[in-house]
Image (tube, rainbow, N blue to C red):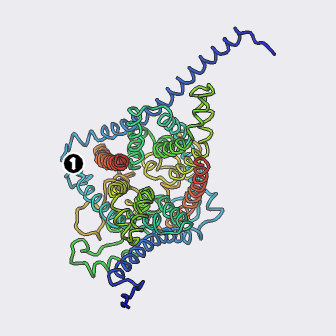
Amino acid sequence: VSTVPAAATQELQGRRRVRDRLGDRLLLALTLAAGLGAVALIGVIAYRILRGAHVAFSSFGLSFVWGTAWDTNKNLFGAAPGLFGTAVTSLMALLIATPLAIAIALFLSELAPRGFRVLVGSLVEMLAAIPSVVLGLWGILVLGPFVTNHLEPWLHRWLGFIPLFDEEGAAPGVFLAGLILAIMVVPIVASVCRELFLSIPSELEEGALALGATRWEMVRGVVLSSSRPGIAAAVILGLGRALGEAIAVTQVIGAQWVIKSSLFVPGDTLASRIAGQYQGAITKLQISSLFYLAAILLVIGLLTNLVAQLVVRRSTFQRTGGS
Amino acid sequence: MAVEPALTLRGDARVRRRRIVNRLAEAGATIAALAAVSVLGIVVWSIAKRGGSELSWGFLTKDLPLFGQPGGGIAPLLVGSALLVGIATAIALPVGVLIAVFLEEFASPAVRAPIQLSVDLLNGLPSIIIGVFVFGLLVYGHPQNGWAGSVGLAIVMLPLVTRATQEVLRLVPSSHREGALALGASRWRTVLGITLPSAFGGILTGTVLAVARAAGETAPLLFATSIFGRTINWNPGQALPNLPVQIFIWSESAEPEDHKRAWASALVLLIFVLATSLIARLALARSRRKLSR
């Protein structure tokens, strides 16, 4: 039996203890710094954008929000047409995408055979992976002509009495932007809803089926009714995406700073106006006005996300708290 | 002998109506799924058809075309995009992993909440906001430069890397950590020697997904690196040519020749993005299965 002097072992252990304590402290400090960095980043982003908007804020004040002009010669700028365009395109995208996405999620979670489920599920997720600039290119050169030549005349003929479908216009426009946004929103809402539906205890579903409910009655009574808050959160997340999409919308919307009731005319959104001005902003006031638009978008975007988070937290709390 | 009422398995009108409604609902869900898949198919097919005929070795290796002239290629765009995304990954990967380690291994609930919220908010931040922020922080008053674009892309990638890492860290069985700690290993040795290595595969695939996302992002680059030369540039101190912004510029052009270039470049970008995210997803599913077993 080899004997190690007791003093030597103690010294070794002592050195190790010091090193371990140092290592622990260091790792904790590093990771904590990174975590606090994430919080600080949000703050710095907000601060930078508000500071950039300072010049526009001091010359327009809050009236920028409801101002309708975008006149570089008279140096008059306002956000209202962009707010209007953002609201209209996002709303249209959600109206199209929500029922579709819920139906897809139901197909993936309740209906599709197992092997098929993975395949279709990953194809739908692939749809979300298409870069927005590529989707926008497709929108302006393929979907656009189709919409102008077929869809818009058809809608105009049958629904033209509604102001929404009044005025036949050229390819780029609010309607096309809404369609492209719908394509972008569908996979997001669908994948959140699918996770939601899969998390419902199968005893509940099997119970309903055993009581003689058809599959649809089971879905309506068990799946949909118990995941309503979650669906709402998914739709709000989709809304966040639609509000903030800049590139694809810039490509297809036609960049007109106007408020019109018809969908078949060019328009603009907050995000697409910012993106569209990337080469054109010269004066300080104009650049600052773009920052102001970004500030409005930031506030709306953060609020949307916060609401979605709150809804999710409350719904998960209810589910775990109830059982 | 009493006559038994006829007991048929065919339902009455009500049952039949319920069954029809059920069939309609099932058909509706199936059609919706088919519609989503066919939109993907149509987009990919039309890009492959238009872009494929333009794609050639010369297109991939030549400098950008002179204004208004035929020919040219996209080599500078490929180099620039690779540089931008590479630098962004070098920033976002370590920081994202550190944040995730803090959230999953160290943070108390009270500290955790605001940091997790910030990561979620970053994830939902419109990318054009990041573009404007980077412009205000790093570009306004200076010439455009690649560093600024990379920082923008890194902000896009950061929450994605963090979330992916968090997810795999949660899957590492706590018995592994407890075993290491019970053997007298310190916290940092446990994290670096046990937890992170077993989460390595998941972190890698999460990063690849983030790279696929960043490679196609246009908005963070639009104000940072959109006015560039037509030759290959390896210096991030200057504006770097890159695929997404050039596709955007070509798609806004009125020249049919530019549209052709846009299609071919879009095909290159799409192949890269779809292939990497497909591979990453398959690997992710495998590593999750392995960890949760």
> Which quarter of the image is occupied by the N terminus of chain A?
top right
Q: Is residue B258 above or below residue B198?
A: below
The residue depicted at 38 percent of the width and 41 percent of the height is: B117
Q: Is residue A55 above or below residue A307?
A: above
Secondary structure beneath label 1 = helix
Residue A12: image location, x then y, percent: 68, 14
Q: Badge 1 local density, few (<14 within 10 Å), some, or many (20+)?
A: many
Q: Which residue is more in the foreground, B247 or A215? A: A215
The chain to which mark 1 is attached is A
Identify which amino acid the numbered label 1 is placed on. Phe
Task: Please state the total of marks drawn on the protein image.
Answer: 1
Residue A224: image location, x then y, percent: 35, 62
Q: Which residue is more in the foreground, A184 or B80? A: A184
The residue depicted at 34 percent of the width and 50 percent of the height is: A315
Residue A290 in sight: no
Q: Is residue A58 above or below residue A71?
A: above
Q: Quadrant of residue A199?
A: bottom left
Q: Which residue is more in the foreground, B56 or B7? A: B7
State left or right for residue A9 relative to residue B266: right
Residue B132: image location, x then y, percent: 38, 45
Q: Residue furthest front?
A: B1
Name the residue that disc number 1 marks: A64
Q: Which residue is more in the foreground, B243 or A119? A: A119
Q: Is residue A185 above or below residue B1?
A: above
